[in-house]
Amino acid sequence: MSNFARAPLAAVLGPTNTGKTHLAVERMTAHSSGMIGFPLRLLAREVYDRIVAMKGPKEVGLLTGEEKILPEGARWLCCTAESMPRDRDVAFAAIDEAQLAADRERGHVFTDRLLHCRGREETMILGSDTLRPILKTLVPEAEIISRPRFSTLSYAGATKLSRLPPRSAVVAFSAEEVYAVAEALRRLRGGAAVVMGALSPRTRNAQVAMFQAGEVDYLVATDAIGMGLNMDVRHVAFASLHKFDGRRQRRLHVHEMAQIAGRAGRHQTDGTFGTLGLEGAEEVSFSEEEINRIEEHEFSWLKQIYWRDGDPRLDTIETLIADLEAKPDDPMLRAAPEATDLAVLKALAGEGWIVERATDPGMVGRLWQACGLPDFRKMGVQGHARLVSRLYRHLTEGDGHIPGDVFAREVTALENLNGDVETLAGRLAAIRTWAYVAHRDDWLADPKRWARRTEEIEQRLSDALHDRLTQRFVDRRTSVLMRDLGAKGEEALPVRVDGEGVVTVDDEPIGRIEGFRFQVEAGASHTDKKRLLAAAERRLGGEYASRAAALIADEDREFALGTVAGKAVAIDWQGRRVARLEAGRTPLAPQIKLDRALDVLSPEMKARVENRLMSWLDSRLAEALGPLLRIDAAIAGEKTPPALRALLAPVVEGGGIAARADLGDVIETLDKALRHRAGQLGLVIGSLDIFHPRMLKPEAIRWRLALGSVFADKPMPDLPPEGATLLAEPKGRTAAHWRRAGFRGFAGQMLRIDMVERLSRSAHDRRDGRNPFAVDTELATSLGLEQEALGKLMHALGFQKQKGDPPQWAWRGRRRKPAKRRAQNAPQPGNAFAKLADLKISRG
C-alpha cells in the first residue's frame, strides 16, 4: 500500500447513523480512483452495488475472500479489510469500522490498514469515537472530525414479543436463538426475516428485501446488523445481553450495545432500543448507566489495539512464526492473540513432510497463504488444519495446483438443494471455503472457471436457503396430511409442538417431547406413522433450540438436584433430567455431564446450557453447604495456622463432621485462641464429634450424601427421614450412609449427633466431680432413646454405671481407643466421601 505522507488524512469518528460510510463513498467517487476496506463481506457487497448503480459495472471492483469482481481498468474497489490489495496505487483510501482494531481475532488486520493504508490524494479512517486517543498517538497527522448522530436514540424499556412494534429488529447472539425467536414471531405476528453474518449476500439481500418491502414487519438478526448494514429499522430489541466471544460467555460491552442499538432510526427519523420480554425467561435488562451512555453516546476510550507484523519474513517456518509472534514496541499496540491462521500454521509446523517442502521463501509463503483459508465451517483448529494440510500437499506437488477432479468432487458434493435451514446453511459455509480457494489466482489451473462454478452453486444454495427460511418463518399455509408421501415428500409436512410438548403432523399426534427427549406415541409402528415420525424428527431442531434457550434464561427455582435413591445424582429442569454430576477434583467441586438427550443441540448451545447449570450448581452449593465451603476456604488461607488446618481438613473431608476420637492429638494442641477461631467458623467441638450444626439440616444432609455418592461414583443412597433426630438402625450400607449424614448408633438406635451433644451437656451439668449422679431420663425419653441405648451412649461419653437402683453414673473420663477401632461407629472423616461402600457396620 502506498504511503503518501503529505496527502490529507482525516479520521471521521462518531456513533452509528451518522452517515460516515455514505460520506466516504461520496469522497471516493469524487476521486479518479479509490478503495474502501469493510468489516463484512455483506457490507462490501452492499456498497459495491450502490456504486455500480452510480458509475456502471465496468468501473467498480469487489474483492472479498469468496468473491472477486475486478473488471480491467476498474477505478473503485470495495473490499473486506483482509482483501485490500497492499500494492494498489489509488487516489483515495479508507478503512471502515476501524475500532475493530481492538478485536481479538481480526484486530491486527485493521491495525495494519490503519497504520499503512494510504491514498495518494486523500485517506479516511472511519470508526467509533473510542478510537480517538489511539489515533492521536499513532497517526498524529490525522485530522479528527466528529460526526453527530442525525436522529435521537432513546430507551423504550422491555417489550413482550406479542407487543413488539412494527419495523422492529430483534437481535440474538446465536443461530439457535435467532431461529427460536423467528419461529415465535411466526406464531404470534405472522413471520420475520432472518439476517446473520453466515448468510451469503444473495440470501441476506432476499431476506432484507422482504422486510424492506413490508412483506414482514420484523427482522431477527445476529449482531451482524451493527456493522453498517442499512435497513429501515425503528426499534431494536435485544433478546439477550450476553454473547459467546469465542472464549467465554460474557455480557456485551456498552459500545457493542450502542453499535447494535444505533441501527434504529435513519437520518432524521428517531429510533428506540430496549429488551425483549420472553414468557418464562429471566428478565433481560440494561443498567441505568448503560442506558445513559448509549443515549448520550459516551463510551470509554480504547487504550490499546492489537498488532501483528503484516509483512513477516518467509525465509523459514521458524522465522515466519517468530515474526508473527513478535511483540510491538509502541505501548498503544498489543501483541495479537493467536488467531486461527497462526494456530493452524503452528499445528502444521510439526509435520515432517511439510517441513521438508517448506524450505524456501516461495514454499513458506505458499504455506502461509494456505493457513489463511478462513474456517467458515467452524471446525476448530485441528479439523481446519487437516483441510489446510490437504490443500498444501496439492499445492506443492505436480504443477502446484489443486487437481481439477479433486476440486470438482468437493464442490459437486455440495450441489444438493434438499434439507432444512441448518443443513443448507452448513453447505453454504462449505461452498464459501471452496469459493475462497477458487479466487486464489495460482491455486487452480483454471481459477476463473471454478470461481464461476462455486458462485453458481452458492447462488443456488442461497436461493434454496431463502426459500427454507421463508417457509419456516413466514409461510403460514396449512398443509393437509398426504398419504402418498412419495409424490409430495416429507419436507412438505407441517410439524407442530403444542404447549404440552405434544408433536403433531397435520393435527395428528405422533409423540411427545419430554424435556429434550422425543417419546413416540403408542401405535407409531404403522408404516405411515413411521414415515411421519421421520419427518418430524428432522423438523424439531428449532423446538430443541427454543427449549435450550428457555433453559438458559430460566430462573434458579426451576432447577433441582435429583436425588432419587438407587440412581445417579442428577440436575433436573422443570422436573426433567438434563444432566448428572460426576466426580471432580474434590468432593465439593463436582463436574456436570449433560444428559445424552441434549446431544440434539449444537456444541455452542450445549456449552451455554452447561454454563447455566454450573452457575446454578455453584449458587445452590453456596446456599446448602456455605459453612463447609467457608471452612474449606479457611484451610487454604495463608493466615490459618497448621494446628487449625489439622482440625479443619478432616471436617471438610468428612462432609462437615469428624469423630473426636480420631482428632484427640489435634484437639490437645489447640489453645483458647484457635478454639475460638474454630467456633467463629461455626464448628462445635463436642464430646464425641466435631461438627457444624447447619450440616445437620435436611437439605445439607441431602447435598452431603449426594456429593459423597458422586465422588465415590455410586448411586444416591437412601436419605434418613427429614427432620428426624432418632432412627432405628438399618441394615447394610444404609447405616454407613446415615452415619455419614450425622447419626451415631447405640444398641439398635441411631441418634443425631447434635442430640448426642445435648445429652452430654445435660450429664456434665448434673455431675459433681467423680461422684455418682442420676441422669436426666426425661430428656432421653423425650428423644425416644431406650434404656439400653442410653447406657451405650453414657458409656461412650466417658461415664461408668454404678451399682444400685435407680442406676447412677460416675465420670471416669474419656479413654482413647486403639487406632484400628477408633470412631468405628462415628461419622467417618478422612477419605469418607470416596469410601462409603467400604465402611464396616457397628452398633456401637
Image (cartoon, rainbow, N blue to C red):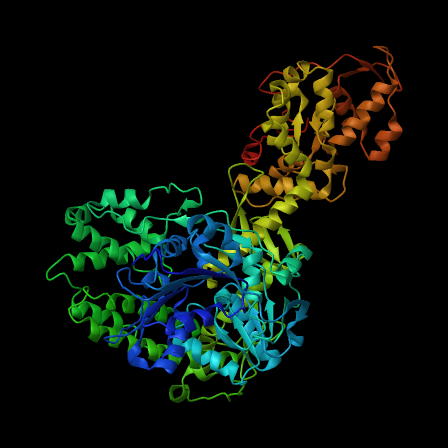
Q: Residue furthest left?
A: 398
Q: Quadrant of residue 819?
A: top right
- Residue at the far front in the pictured view: 6
Judge left or right: residue 69 versus residue 335. left
Q: Residue furthest top?
A: 770
Give the residue displayed 75% in from the left and 20% down from the top. Answer: 797
Q: Is residue 512 visible?
A: no
Q: How far across and down, in percent of the image, does residue 37 sit?
A: 38, 64
Residue 832 visible in the shown view: yes
Is 718 or 227 nearer to us in this picture? Answer: 227
Seen in the picture, residue 441 relative to 384 is either above or below; the reply is: below
When the figure is inspected, residue 740 is found, relative to residue 817, above or below; the finding is below
Left or right? Give the position of 803 relative to 290. Answer: right
- Between 580 and 749, the residue placed more toward the observer is 580
Q: Position of residue 274 (x, y in %)?
A: 64, 66
Q: Quadrant of the N terminus?
A: bottom left
